[in-house]
Image (spheres, rainbow, N blue to C red):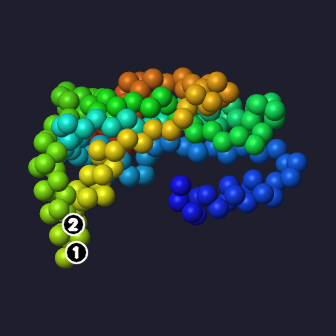
Amino acid sequence: MEGRKLRPEEILWKEAGDLVWTVLRPTNVWGPRHPTFPGSTWKYLARRWYPLPSGFDPVRSYGYVTNVVGQMMAASKAEPAAVNQRIFYVGDEPIASSKWLDGFSFALTGRKARRVPGNVLKLLALGGEVMHRIGGPAPLDRGRLYRMTTDYQVPMEGTFETLGRGSVSRDQGIEETVAWLQKALPDEYQQK
């Protein structure tokens, strides 16, 4: 974990004394009104520009916003003994990234996301690095490719046991999010 995020938790562990505390760490939260996905990932999926690397299917931790908020509310209402001095990741069950991306791609275009050979994406990522160096935009660079091909899953068992699972399925969350995209940004996300 980055130092700036870890430091407050270190202080909490050392200085809290008898104070009842709980740390909630959201996973990759998504849903309507997300600040960046409409102009990046979802836009690229809708235009069929998002290159899903073939040969890689990392497992990622996502959390639909309604489910994350529900778990946060459950933590605030839980008996202190159940949550005191505990750290919970809040979100949904970790899944293969392709399932989440294909779900959005299918909802937006009627087709799964495009698969592109990993070696081709490595070349494009190197080109992105060159673009960054000369000051231009690059939707794909080595950092982005790394994130597209690397697992990021967090332990959710304690969260589910203590705070429950979300009430909204991935498919329902995608449906709600796409409906919002089509209403809020109709020029970008026309109904298929």
Q: Is residue 150 left or right of residue 5?
A: left
Residue 129: which numbered mark, if any? 2
Residue visible at 82% across and 54% down? Answer: 16
At horizontal 53% and vertical 55% (from top left) the residue drawn is 1
Find the residue positioned furthest to the bottom: 134
Residue farthest along the right direction in this orientation: 18
In the displayed structure, 104 sits above or below 141; it is above
Of residues 48 and 27, the one nearer the viewer is 27
Residue at 17% x, 53% y is: 122
Locate the C terminus and report the quarter of the image it occupies.
top left
Residue 30 located left or right of residue 81: left
Q: Position of residue 188 (x, y in %)?
A: 25, 46
Residue 106 in the image, given as x and y percentages of width and height: 24, 28
Quick one: 178 or 137, which is closer to the camera?
A: 137
**Label 1 amino acid?**
Arg
Q: Residue 33 appears at what percent x and percent y?
A: 44, 45
| Residue 3 occupies quadrant | bottom right
Badge 1: residue crowd in 10 Å (few <14, some 14–19, many ≥20): few
Q: Are marks 1 and 2 in contact (CB under 8 Å)?
A: yes
Indicate the quadrant where residue 30 lies: top left
Q: CA distance from mark 1 to mark 2?
A: 6 Å
> Label 2: few (<14), some or many (≥20) within 10 Å?
some
Residue 133, numbered circle? 1
Observer able to see residue 113: yes
Residue at point 37% right, 35% down? 59
Q: Secondary structure at mark 1?
A: helix
* Residue 88 locus on image (x, y percent): 63, 39
